[in-house]
Amino acid sequence: VFGPDGALYVSSGEGASPVTADYGQIGSNPCGDPSFEGGAVRSQDLETNFNPTGDPITWSGAIVRLDPNTGEARSDNPLVQGQPQGTPSAADDPIIAYGLRNPYRLTFRPGTNDLWIGDVGWGYAEEINVHTNPDGFVENFGWPCYEGSSPQGVYQSKNIPICNALYSQPARVEAPYYAYVHESQPGGTECQAKDSAISSLEFINGSPYPTSLDGSLVVADYGVGCIWLMEPGGNGLPDPGHVETLATGRYTTDITRAPNGSLYIVDIVFGTVSRLDLAGSGAAPIARVTASPPGGSTAPLSVTFDARTSSGTNLSFAWDVDNDGEFDDGTGGVITRTLQRGTHLVSVRASSGGFSDTASVSVPVNNNPPTVTITSPPASATFSAGDVIVLDASASDPDGTQLTDGSYEWQLLLHHCTGQDCHQHFEGTYTGRRQNVQGSSHPYPSYLEAVVTVHDGMGGTTTASREIQPVPATLTVTTDPPGGKIQLTPDLVTTPASQVVIASSELSISAPARQVINGQTYGFVGWSQGGPRSQEVTVSTDMTVTARYALDNTSVTVTPSAIVMPDTFVGQTTTTNVTVTTSGPAASVPGYIESAIISGAGLALGAVPDAVPVNTSATIPVTFSPTVSGSINGQATLVINGKNYTVPITANANLAPIATLQVPSDAGEIGRIITGAPRRFDVRLAAVGEPYQRPIRITGASSTDSRVSIVEVPTLINVGETGVVTISVSEDEMGEFNSELVVLVGLERVTIALHAGVSEATDSPALFDPTSGRWQVTDVYGSTRHFYYGNPGDLPLLGDWDCDGFDTPGMFRPSNGFVYITNRAQTGVADREFFYGQGGDIPIVGDWNNNGCDTLAIYRSGEVFVRNSLGTGVADYSYFFGDNGDRPFAGDFDGDGVTSVGLYRETTGFVYFRDLLTSGKAEQSFFYGIPSDKIIAGDYDGDRKETVGIFRPLESRFYLSNVNAQRAADLMIDIDGASGWIPTVGLLPI
């Protein structure tokens, strides 16, 4: 929903199993959650911000607040501002509330920024929660540790560390504004008290409802089919003590307030949208429509549509004849239209006093609907949870229309029935004749219905359906001795007790560690089937499980009596142990650790065993991971067999040492400087050390050499990262450049030697071997070097991609139009990749707008497509120059700073120039080279003008000219290359 503040508010469910307690133990753990932090516990991800296991932050069971223009967190969100719940990661920045199970609907109380949340519960309670915005805090509503206002019994029995911490600090959990348990519905007894699911909520705000109801909250529950009204109290807020039933038998999925204040209700079971009318709010029209004739076997057909039997006063009518959703095809109570062959759905909207209703009629004209038969599954088919169910159908059209796979649309529905109430859940929709779906593990009694609709393309449809009944299985739980209590999802039951499920479903069972049976205290010994005290049972067939108990004669010792943690650094973790030892008769019960919590900043408990067998010991790790320096005092509290054991803990943390600055031996090796042209260069510094060490603080950088200017200096370099001091260097004389850079690290001066070779700005010819990706670069002075970049079949590019005055490689992949560029003239991988052009295009590189940066153009069948930025997109402009088959090349031929395009006609050896980037004829042409030569253009003499050259594969030789004219070459360079190699040229940083 969009808030009054302009922000976009989005809710997300926790995505856990609806049938059994899911804390990450089910399946293959695809999200990689740490132990006891998956499943429903992902709703508590913000509680694990500083967990040393590094559990990633998700939006499960959370509300996020976003900027609708960017999709990013709003800058004024609480966690962006550094509230205590924050972490160094930006993943939590959008979150404003968490600890929710399924926050299905959101709304804002009119006139405020208060967000009201309808949160669908599990097996016990439904909640209405309120997030007061802005209040500067991130609310934790407690799921799965809490449901309603109380601890969630099944999850509490799982001894989940995050929940144990919240149980010890209940003030950290925001209680619901209103909660109702499934056995006690709001508004009286009109609604069936089972299987609740709060599915929508909205406020009444003025007309057309009585003013006495302003501020009332309308709440819908899909599970029980009821709508309630919570009237405002003396403070203007909805009063949970004044709830009345408005409607029953309504399976609502949404309530929306129209601009005129009316509330509209979406019923997914009956497929209706209704307006809520209350006493004094006026009567609504009821639309009705008939067609005469109702259809016909010949086309075209004249049909009269009559809506005059609609109910209401002072009615006006609008028609939608073409079924486009717009009521713009006629007015009045009666219209006549001529219809062509097909099945036509015609609708009318009747309006009166600001209210409206719609009705529709279907008219077949010379069009018979298709016939369809479901061939799979058979009528006798049944399913178990997880079974693969094959849906298949066969259809034909009596009018001869060819039906395709796309003519079939399937819908899989799940019907959940309890008592007199049956409601639907949509399992999925699919297109195509044959589909594979999965048997549901939804609570029993439920069954699946497969519905197929076949469309003939002329508006005619036929629907068939098949019910698929489940295989039931019963789990019976007992205790020995009998009469004990067991947690059986989701209830605490007195044994013996049974629950029916769809076969192969999982149920959670949990035996209390200690309980009173027949007036005596017993302790849990084990399950008849084995396994832990709390476990999931797959109920494939009827089965009985028994929890065995024995009298509690076990003594427990917890050591040490107090813990002094070893001193550590901020960012480090140190560990010690608490030991639990049990003793007693061999038949006595284990020491059940019913809860284990710890207090104190930076202190945490490791894995806590469920039980310690009699006459054995178990250790529980205690970790100290401080985030600030100083001393802390805390304690670990264990509840074992109903008794409390407290271990005081003291710990001390010191500031970690600062990381070590590492200056690479080549940090100041600049490479090449061009005379008279300043060059930016990055001096890279590394921080090395242990992860807990503090970052290096850079306080400045300087040079006494006027040829060196400081551009940018980092302030902090974290351990394992690289900091960059950016400088600009210049030199007017050719030869060697030597200087020094001083970097201040705190109060320490670190001197870095700078070195470069200085030469004129002359381009270097290069060859690319398309069979291996090998580059060979030879400058005009005869110096040669090699490196690898690109894949076989790529086309080579050289360009100044980062605007530093030097050209580095790029590759154009003709098979798909992808471009891969790098800012280093050496073996490596791309710094950037994007898509531009298409297979078969010829890429050309240039500075098309004189901004000092090269971008890409492509040449396609005599047309040049120019783009002035590096990235996927369309051309900024295009123009025509040359003929299909010409070989394009690029250069600044007149020295004006703007690259233009030349053409080389390889069959004749003619060169054509045009300095303007517009359609037209060549402004200059001349003969250069011989047929089969490969054209290039570069600045070979440093005059800032680019001139032609060719590579002659037969001789492995470059012929370079300093003038764009028909004449002998000024310079020849022999190079070790082969006939299939591709030439290019650029000012490389060698």
Image (tube, rainbow, N blue to C red):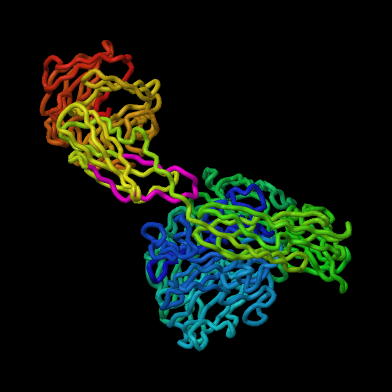
Q: In this view, does 681 lie to the left or right of 6?
A: left
x%, y% of residue 895? 12, 32
Quadrant for residue 81, please give it.
bottom left
Q: Is residue 647 visible?
A: yes
Residue at 47% in and 86% down: 210
Q: Can residue 860 be seen in this view?
A: no
Residue at 50% in and 55% down: 570
x%, y% of residue 64? 47, 62
Outermost residue toward the front? 748
Residue 316 magenta-drawn? Answer: no
Residue at 61% in and 59% down: 604
Q: Is residue 272 left or right of residue 504?
A: left
Q: Is residue 916 left or right of residue 749?
A: left
x%, y% of residue 560? 70, 60
Taking 603 as reference, is 483 above or below it? below
The quarter of the rendered structure image containing the N terminus is bottom left
The quarter of the rendered structure image containing the C terminus is top left
- Highlighted range, magenta: 683-703
x%, y% of residue 961? 15, 20
- Work out whether residue 447 or residue 914 is closer to the camera in this orientation and state it: 914
Residue 685 magenta-drawn? Answer: yes
Outermost residue toward the top? 955
Taking 867 as reference, is 625 above or below it? below
Quadrant for residue 804, please give it.
top left
- Work out whether residue 860 or residue 122 is closer to the camera in this orientation and state it: 122
Taking 447 as reference, is 456 above or below it? above
Quadrant for residue 485, please give it.
bottom right
Magenta region's main secondary structure?
Answer: strand
Q: Is residue 317 left or right of residue 195?
A: left
